[in-house]
Amino acid sequence: MIDIELNEIDYRSITGIKIDDEIIDIKYKKNIVAKVANFLFNKGYLNKNDVPISSGFSRYIVNVEKIHKDGSKFFYPFKLDNGLYVETHNSPKNSCKYAIKLVKRSRLDNKKVKFIF
């Protein structure tokens, strides 16, 4: 598990994430979920069998369609390299939270994940 909680960091100052010795630059916090998801799927840490990935009671972070659990459409869908969709309509804090959730759900050794400030 990732030992870091968002309360312990200033999520607004995150400029990147280092995953498995690769750095993902984060210019806009809304892109963090899409960039982390693309990385995890492209490297095989997540696959289509892991989808949908929920953010909570009514929404999905990643799905095969641009539709949430409750039937509503993704507000700002982003199409990943593999054709899956990520919802990018999140606050900066939730974007970071959902990126962490994706990493926790993956087959990645979470000790290989670090935020860059």
Image: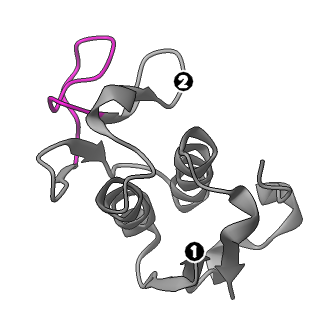
Occupied quadrant, residue 115: bottom right
Whole-percent x, y for residue 26 in the image: 45, 81
Q: Find disc 2 in the rendering and name its residue.
A: 56
Instruction: Tell me if mark 2 has few (under 14), some (14-19) or many (20+) residues whose alpha carbon lies within 10 angstroms of its own.
Output: few
Residue, x 70% and y 58% (percent of image)? Answer: 110
Q: Is residue 112 found left or right of 8 in the rendered image?
A: left
Q: Main secondary structure of the magenta part?
A: loop
Occupied quadrant, residue 51: top left
Above or below: residue 36 compared with residue 106 = below
Instruction: Tell me if mark 1 has few (under 14), some (14-19) or many (20+) residues whose alpha carbon lies within 10 angstroms of its own.
Output: some
Q: Which badge, 2 or 1, is on the more N-terminal residue? A: 1
Q: Could you tell me which secondary element the residue under label 1 belongs to?
A: loop
Q: Which mark is residue 104?
A: none
Magenta part of the chain: 63-76
Residue, x 18% and y 42% (percent of image)? Answer: 84
Q: Could you tell me which secondary element the residue under label 2 belongs to?
A: loop
Residue, x 45% and y 81% (percent of image)? Answer: 24
Nearer the camera: disc 2 or disc 1: 1
Name the amino acid type tagged 1.
Asp
Residue 81 showing in the rendered view: yes
Name the amino acid type tagged 2.
Gly
Labels 2 & 1 near each other (Cβ < 8 A): no
Q: Find disc 1 in the rendering and name its residue.
A: 20
CA separation, marks 2 and 1? 27 Å
Whole-percent x, y for residue 95 in the image: 51, 55
Above or below: residue 80 compared with residue 15 = above
Colour option used: one colour
Quadrant position of the C terminus in the picture: bottom right
Q: Residue 72: within the magenta?
A: yes
Q: Is residue 116 found left or right of 28 in the rendered image?
A: right
